[in-house]
Amino acid sequence: DAKTTQPPSMDCAEGRAANLPCNHSTISGNEYVYWYRQIHSQGPQYIIHGLKNNETNEMASLIITEDRKSSTLILPHATLRDTAVYYCIVRLSNSGYALNFGKGTSLLVTP
Amino acid sequence: DAGVTQSPTHLIKTRGQQVTLRCSPKSGHDTVSWYQQALGQGPQFIFQYYEEEERQRGNFPDRFSGHQFPNYSSELNVNALLLGDSALYLCASSLAYGYTFGSGTRLTVV
């Protein structure tokens, strides 16, 4: 699986959009970008994933650049409950095997 | 629909002892993975079980072993505990590629 690079921490004001970047310059053509988050003292939670097109669900939007070397997770209206560590993971969708978590980005949403 | 259930939630063990952690997967999921998460770090993959066999293993010593039962539940065993084994142990179940994690077992080795 390709390696990812994320900033260690970010702040966001409540109600504003949180934009979390991820670099994955060595991604291969059939690897997907996955995002998980981990709220303190809980297990990681799946957020969204995509291959090349932008994706949106009830939790977030995922914007993948045309060359697929980077992506951005967007939480459109951040709340205090979105304070968590966010992990960007690149992997084959059908491998069924390990998720390679890095250190992620610690997002702090402030009042 | 119950998610992934892990037990116990917390436990304290002494160096050199053995420990068994348990995981019940989400209904309909047939694959169980175990992760170790040290404080301030991302989860690290230990191994994955499918059809009662270890399918993939991460970079962990043989002191870490596991088992999957016919009902898909799983156990993680750690022998000869070291202080460095203190961590949050997470279980994740899956069907195809969608992973659901439990809240983990917090193991403290003293």
Image (cartoon, coloured by chain):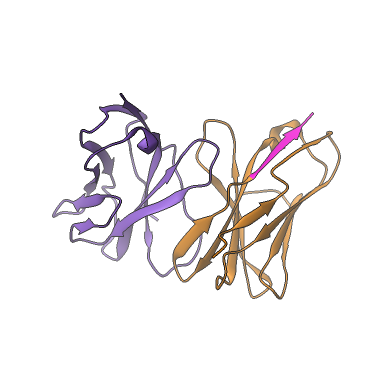
Q: Residue furthest top?
A: A111
Q: Position of residue B19 (x, y in %)?
A: 80, 47
Q: Quadrant of the C terminus of chain B?
A: top right
Q: Colour of chain B?
A: orange
Q: Position of residue B107 (x, y in %)?
A: 71, 38
Asked if residue A72 lies left or right of residue A66, the reply is right
Q: Quadrant of the N terminus of chain B?
A: bottom right
Q: Quadrant of residue A94?
A: bottom left
> Main structural element of the magenta stretch: helix, strand or loop?
strand
Residue in front for this viewpoint, A87 or A90 = A87
Q: Residue at x 73, y 71 (%)?
A: B69
Q: Colour of chain A?
A: purple
Q: Residue furthest left?
A: A66
Q: Position of residue B91 (x, y in %)?
A: 60, 54
Residue in front for this viewpoint, B71 or A69 = B71
Asked whether residue A105 is in view, the answer is: no
Q: Residue at x 57, y 52 (%)?
A: B102
The magenta-colored residue range is B105-110
Asked if residue A77 lies left or right of residue A2, the reply is left
Specify whether residue B108 is painted magenta. Answer: yes
Q: Eyeballing the image, is A53 above or below B109?
A: below
Q: Eyeballing the image, is B101 above or below A95?
A: above
Q: Residue at x 31, y 35 (%)?
A: A79
Asked if residue A20 lies left or right of residue A89, the reply is left
Q: Quadrant of residue B105?
A: top right
Q: Quadrant of residue B25?
A: bottom right
Q: Residue at x 27, y 49 (%)?
A: A60
Specify whether residue B15 is painted magenta. Answer: no
